[in-house]
Amino acid sequence: MDKKLVKVLDTTLRDGSQTASISFTLNDKIRIALYLDKIGIDFIEGGWPSSNPKDYEFFRKIKEYSLRSKVAAFGSTRRKDTKAEKDPTLNSILESDVDTAVIFGKSWILHVTDVLRVSKEDNLNLITESIEYLKQHGLYVIFDAEHFYQGFLDSADYAMQVIKAAEEAKADVIALADTNGGTTPDKIYDITSYVVKQTNVEIGLHMHNDIGCGVANTLMGVLAGARHVQGTINGIGERTGNADLIQIIPTLVLKFGFKVLKDINSLKELKPLSRLVYELSGVSPNPFQPYVGDNAFAHKAGVHADAVIKNHRAYEHVDPESVGNSRKILISEVAGSANLVNYLERLGINIDKKDPRLKSILQKIKDLENHGYSFDIAPASAALIALKDLGLYEKVFDVEYWKVINENGLALALVKVNSYLEASEGVGPVNAIDLAIRKALQNIFPDISKIKLIDYRVVLPGEIKNTESVVRVTIEFTDGEKQWKTIGVSRSVIEASIEALVSGFDYYIQISKKLKPLVV
Amino acid sequence: MDKKLVKVLDTTLRDGSQTASISFTLNDKIRIALYLDKIGIDFIEGGWPSSNPKDYEFFRKIKEYSLRSKVAAFGSTRRKDTKAEKDPTLNSILESDVDTAVIFGKSWILHVTDVLRVSKEDNLNLITESIEYLKQHGLYVIFDAEHFYQGFLDSADYAMQVIKAAEEAKADVIALADTNGGTTPDKIYDITSYVVKQTNVEIGLHMHNDIGCGVANTLMGVLAGARHVQGTINGIGERTGNADLIQIIPTLVLKFGFKVLKDINSLKELKPLSRLVYELSGVSPNPFQPYVGDNAFAHKAGVHADAVIKNHRAYEHVDPESVGNSRKILISEVAGSANLVNYLERLGINIDKKDPRLKSILQKIKDLENHGYSFDIAPASAALIALKDLGLYEKVFDVEYWKVINENGLALALVKVNSYLEASEGVGPVNAIDLAIRKALQNIFPDISKIKLIDYRVVLPGEIKNTESVVRVTIEFTDGEKQWKTIGVSRSVIEASIEALVSGFDYYIQISKKLKPLVV
């Protein structure tokens, strides 16, 4: 076995879905699993079938894709009052029809006596029988020793009896869990080293972040000899969360030279993967997140930035590109223009950094941001402002009139775009307006039908004034190739939505000037 | 000297104010300093007078309060081309009229030659002369050895020459800085231990979080013998931030038994202090922050809630009260009866854990969460489901009919609630409906006017189907005392908003049954 190889089990879809305020749909889970497979995660813990009906569906659906990653179902050791073959949890794992099982058992006497309420001996038996039962059915079995470190500090003797029982039952991996997340890195190292020496089975780690050491504890456990690490993307999970794989993986590879994932280029996928999970979690990305956060390689202008330009090692612990991130010089007036020039270049518009119009564009952006806009999340809307100031904007259509009628379950929209009056019925007012505007735009821009919405969000950015508050709507569009985001701000969610919708269509038309002769 | 005593230097006002997007006013700085003093922080690094003139004001103003904490001014060693007594930076520290100075110098050859561009010998001289100059003026001098760990790994010999020079110049504390934040906890421990053995001066630590180990690295450094720690509140700072004192302090006290702060009760002040700094930073509190986050002691999974209620040590590494936090039991698809029983108890409803109705309530919650609901963020909506199943729900009002008309800038709503037909105009459709329903409810429940909306959010929880997607609306209400959150899910943002609004009013009426005789 290659001593430099570390296997990764991702439990974003199981432990991660136990995060307060996070609830993944089946489709979310599939999207995440496919990305985890893409970067070469070894094990994807898909769910806890006996506790959550949605998870059966996941295991059934994921079979339609031929993943390289092993898909694992999670559960506990058998109940104290049933035989393994009659145990609903163990059988739910078999019914999930996966090749890998992760089951947790108790290794802390307090849990055996106070929570499970069985004798120490019986606890060992149900661990043995549960593992043996799953092994008999040909599964690869990962045993999570819950509360192992606290258990060891309480009674090393009993905690080791649990490990021995799991080893003798032929568990393929024994993962030591710091379930309460309160163990310090020094103890993690010492205890893990001891277990590695005392066993002949692959040792894994399952850390939580309750004292802010989830990442460090995992690193220390690997240095102590563990070669299987469990965690979640962005560290989501119960309470303060699990160890964050987004932070652990690059350190294992770049600082210690371990082999993790498919290849070193997979590290570049960590930022998009992190963003996907944030998006589906409904949590906004943490700009301070190590390696992938927007500020992770942000430098102040002046001397500090000079130093980085002279030698990037001066203030960067790794090359930002190596983890799919990039260097950022913080916004000053100049840095602002530079960002804008850079963005316009990517739209094929070359403009001199000294062009005075850049200042006026930045001024407009600042003013609008004072009124609830936020262009860093909606660059397409910023582009429209820039195009107008630069005289590169060609007015193509105008929503001259609109009306929406909502009535128990019914939503009707009436719009007049250029000369075209169109009406549509939708499942909701935004949908109705969307359909009516598309109908009208078909006449001047047939390609409009290619455009789909990928995301739609509404938040209250500003001061709270009851339902009178200003709402900020952001919409993400795609034509199947490109993606772009626009923003609308108004005290009416309908008007803000219309602004974002119209900007989205307008941006696409302006950029891909594939216009029929205008009727206006 | 007491080996169990660890001194703390807070640099929230200096390193923390160099965070992207954070800028403190003078008044903010005073408020933070007073709170730091209140909990007994040893050193408050108030600013960098030579780089930021407005910091002089802080040092002048803070003198009006008689703090127990030492106030420190920050700066660098003298410039290569001036004498110490002529150096503007060193003199700016003297002009700040503080009793403690923190100056940083280079300990990594790469910075000496590539950034500072002086000889290794000259670098040692300017460190010596700068410290001696400040000591001659009677200051307590803390020397920050910038990039020390990288410098040591590059050339241990030169890095130690720097430490020796500072020690011979009689620095009171030598703080070892992991300026790029990329050093791993194992190396921090080894290198710090070596320095502690080689010196007779108090060793301090200044860690950054670029690999997510800012907290762990500080802990490992203290275990290696350092007795002075530097960090910021909430870990704000350059790039990914500094080591978070909010996480470090309780671990030093509760896990290792070190003496930190005024007394153990100061730990209860960490959550309010953390909140104050978030508020003044304009950053929303991180619910996953160890010790003080809203989710730090929140239990979502059924097995966890059940166990914690039996014995809180089961899934809590410390008592939440010890750090001024509290336990939270969440209701969701992964919840068990225990979560629900506990939640209902807090509503004054006592129900046996074995009651079969609990299962049917949880089943309803699971089914609804499969359709885009998320009850852990909207417990009031979960309560309404429970009250209905338990026969404790008394139907008070019914929205029999509603209609909304939107037309360029105009929003009108018509509702029939019980026998009352009411119409309202609003700034947007949700506002119009809100006003119309309130009008109607006034008739049966005058107190409705006390209810205000605190937050309103819309997200797409599910599979993306263009503007036909299901939207999830969450609304937070308050009556001035209590706060509660409800949820609505529909393909129409209007209908989802109405559901959440109506549930919010209904919850308040059900819980505080202050009803006039019903007209229905």
Image (cartoon, coloured by chain):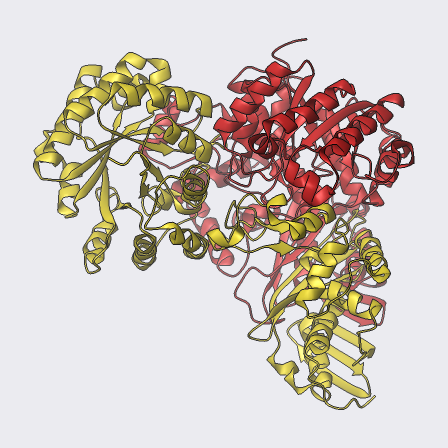
Chain colours: A red, B yellow
Taking the view exactly as shown, the residue that stands out farthest to the top is A1
Q: Is residue A21 visible?
A: no
When the figure is inspected, residue B141 is found, relative to residue A266, above or below; the finding is below
Q: Is residue B298 visible?
A: yes
In the picture, which quadrant includes the C terminus of chain B?
bottom right
Res B195 → quadrant: top left
When the figure is inspected, residue A457 is found, relative to residue A207, above or below; the finding is below
In the picture, which quadrant includes the N terminus of chain B?
top left
Q: Is residue A349 left or right of residue A108?
A: left
Count of numbered marks: 0
Q: Is residue A64 left or right of residue A289?
A: right
Res B358 → quadrant: bottom right
When the figure is inspected, residue A123 is found, relative to residue B152, above or below; the finding is below
When the figure is inspected, residue B37 is found, relative to residue A126, above or below; the finding is below
Residue at position x 56%, y 71% in the image: A465
Residue at position x 67%, y 51% in the image: B310
Q: Position of residue B178 (x, y in %)?
A: 37, 28
Q: Position of residue A200 (x, y in %)?
A: 68, 13
